[in-house]
Structures are given as C-alpha cells and as structure tokens.
Image: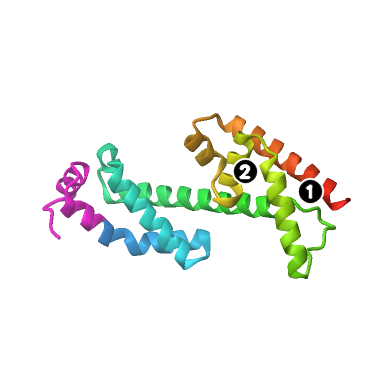
Amino acid sequence: MDFGSDTEFYNQLKSGSHKALDHLFHQYHYWLVITAHTFLRNENEAQETVQEFFIDFWENNRYESLTVNSTDALKNYLFICIKNRCLNRISRNKTRKKRYENLLLPKDHILPEKPLENIELKSRLDNAVNQLTQRQKEVFELGYLHDKTRKEIATELGIAHETVKKLMAQALKSLRESLNKTRNI
C-alpha cells in the first residue's frame, strides 16, 4: 500500500483509517509475533498476545494518541507495547501457578485414590466454601474458579485491590481451617 510518505501514513493512522490500520497490521504482525515469542517461549501465547494488542489498539482508539513520526519511533512504540504485554502475561502466569500451588491442601496431604474419597473431599470443600461470607466466596470463586487476577476481580466487583487481597487471604485461611477440622474428624 502506498501512502505517498511516512507523514501521510502516520496522519491516516492517527485518524483511524482502515487502510492505514490494515497496513500497520500486515507490516508488523510477523515481527511482533517473533518479538513476543522471545519473551514467552510459546508460539500460541505469542500469537494471542499480538492479536490482543491489535484488538485493543483498534477498539480503544489507541492510534489517536500516537506521537510517532518515523518508522523507528513506530517500531519502538510497538516493541514496548508487546514487551509490556508479555511481561504482564508472564506475571499473571506466575501468580496463577502460585495460587494453585498454595491453594488449599497442606504439602503433606495425599490426595485420595478412590473415587468415593474424592467425592467426600469435594463435599468437604463445597461445605467449606459455603461457610464463607458472600464477598469472600465471590472473590475466591472469581480468583480460583474463573482464574481472574486481583485487578480484574476488583474491577468486576467494584472494590479496591487491597480489599480483594484481604478477602482472598481471609477466604483461604477459613477454607484451610475448615478442611483441616473435617479432615481430623
């Protein structure tokens, strides 16, 4: 696609021209996927990250606030956006992994091998979850069952990030105590 000059391209991009946005996607998509892959070491996650970036860039009109006026500045902008998204994704993955590792069961707990024991464990867990306050239950389910970050939970429930952190800690403490009591009975 020919825009006459870089200035013409950047002006059309900032105005939201479909032609300019399409050109941006086709010009930089492959390079951005390679960039994301160097951080994530996973092709599917790299593809998803770049796709999410372009969707966000388009839907939230991020092109309107661009202050680039050269190819190098545009490449730097795109690189920084993808790098930050990759680092955020890595951080979320570490947080999720940590959550699952610390979920509810003590490290010395052995999971039951028999289906009947698994049913009993699920029943104990359901009873323990039902003993939580409504807010603790909401935060726990959004964090552990729906795999949402604290920030996402805070936004969805309209509460502060620190409140989510506090409610999650209270819920986990309560669940551990409840499960330990029923385990010892």
The residue beneath circle 1 is 179
Q: Left or right: where does residue 90 sit relative to residue 10?
A: right
- Viewer-nearest of labels 2 and 1? 1
Residue behind mark 2: 140
Q: Residue furthest right?
A: 184
x%, y% of residue 43?
A: 46, 67
> If you read the primary sequence from the N terminus, does the residue marked by circle 2 or circle 1 appear first?
2
The answer to whether residue 101 is left or right of residue 3 is right
Q: CA distance from mark 2 to mark 1?
A: 15 Å
- Mark 2 neighbour class, 10 Å CA radius: few under 14, some 14 to 19, many 20 or more: many
Numbered badge on residue 19: none
Place residue 101 in its image quadrant.
bottom right
Residue 67's x, y, as percent? 28, 38
Three-letter code, disc 1? Leu
Residue at point 21%, 42% (across, down): 14
Relative to the observer, which residue lies in front, 34 or 166? 166
In screen coordinates, is 114 left or right of 144? right
Which stretch did the figure color magenta?
Answer: 1-24
- Residue ID at (50%, 41%): 152
Q: Residue at x 49, y 62 (%)?
A: 38
SS at mark 1 in the image? helix
Rendering coords of residue 128 (x, y %): 72, 45
